[in-house]
Amino acid sequence: MTTYLLETERLRLRELRPDDVNALHGVLGDPETMRYYPHPFTREETTAWIDKNLERYAEDGHGLWAMELKTSGELIGNCGPTVQRVDGDDLVEIGWHVRRDLWRRGFATEAAEACRDHAFDALGLPRVISLVRPENKGSCRVAEKIGMTVWRQTLRGPGWVHHVYSMTGGDRAALDSRG
Ligand SMILES: CC(C)(COP(=O)(O)OP(=O)(O)OC[C@H]1O[C@@H](n2cnc3c(N)ncnc32)[C@H](O)[C@@H]1OP(=O)(O)O)[C@@H](O)C(=O)NCCC(=O)NCCS
């Protein structure tokens, strides 16, 4: 039986499984989706991505989770909190990828908001971040829509500048009080 960790209006989030490889590869193997990564994933890299997240679940209790559409049960992306080392500090990032044919329907924002609330309320974290290349306008917008602002910048991967978007529990409380 599948255990769902988070539920939103249209989505359910659960741990990734090895048999998600085909559906997840439909997301991470797409050249446009992976435009801001070194290259689209090969099938082997998608398998390794699932394996890495299985390790994270075991070690950290969380990781990138499968994003399932409630209506059909299909996997349409991933979203979740992962530990990232940023300039010597271990911080928890909310990350997201959505299958390209379903972009701009609010799925990334819906999943990311649920993960943000989980990070503050269930995990009790003081701060969550998101690492986004400034050119990646869609992802910057998701971070901003869930209440993050650019905190600083860092270099990732092959020397690429990334915004470190961030928010604290206090920032969220301020958002809530503004409605
Ligand atoms: C970034 C991504 C997850 C957004 O997913 P999505 O489900 O389309 O996002 P949403 O529908 O929730 O959109 C959130 C906001 O971003 C905007 N947006 C989405 N894609 C955009 C784009 N390519 N350019 C500019 N704005 C964009 C939406 O219009 C919306 O803003 P609005 O409400 O002000 O109109 C998706 O484009 C994706 O998977 N990209 C590739 C993977 C990636 O870069 N992941 C992040 C690595 S840091």
Image (cartoon, grey):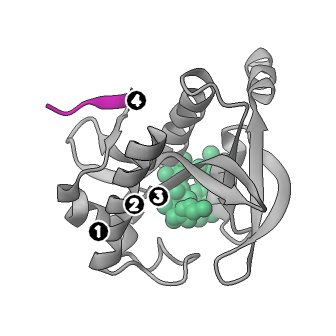
Q: Kindly tell me whether residue 104 is visible in this rendering.
A: no
Disc 2 marks which amino acid? Lys
Judge depth for marks 2 and 4 and give the one in front.
2
Name the residue carrying label 3. Answer: 97
Neighbor class of circle 3 (other Cα within 10 Å; few <14, some 14-19, many 20+) is: many
Question: In the rendered structure, which segment of residues is drawn in magenta?
Answer: 1-7
| Above or below 72: residue 133 | below
> Element under label 4?
strand
Marks 2 and 4, Cα distance to the nearest angstrom? Answer: 20 Å
Q: Is mark 3 within 8 Å of ligand 1?
A: yes
Q: Is mark 2 within 8 Å of ligand 1?
A: no
> Element under label 1?
helix
Disc 1 marks which amino acid? Thr
Please report whichever mark, 3 or 4, sits nearer to the chain's N-terminal start.
4
State yes or no: residue 29 in magenta.
no
State the residue in front, 119 or 54: 54
Marks 3 and 4, Cα distance to the nearest angstrom? Answer: 17 Å
> Which mark is on residue 6?
4
Locate the C terminus and report the quarter of the image it occupies.
Answer: top right
State yes or no: residue 2 in magenta.
yes
Split into quadrants, the picture shows ligand 1 in the one at bottom right
Disc 3 marks which amino acid? His
Please report whichever mark, 2 or 4, sits nearer to the chain's N-terminal start.
4
Please report whichever mark, 1 or 2, sits nearer to the chain's N-terminal start.
1
Marks 3 and 1, Cα distance to the nearest angstrom? Answer: 16 Å
Judge depth for marks 2 and 3 and give the one in front.
2
Q: Is mark 4 within 8 Å of ligand 1?
A: no
Name the residue carrying label 2. Answer: 52
Name the residue carrying label 1. Answer: 47
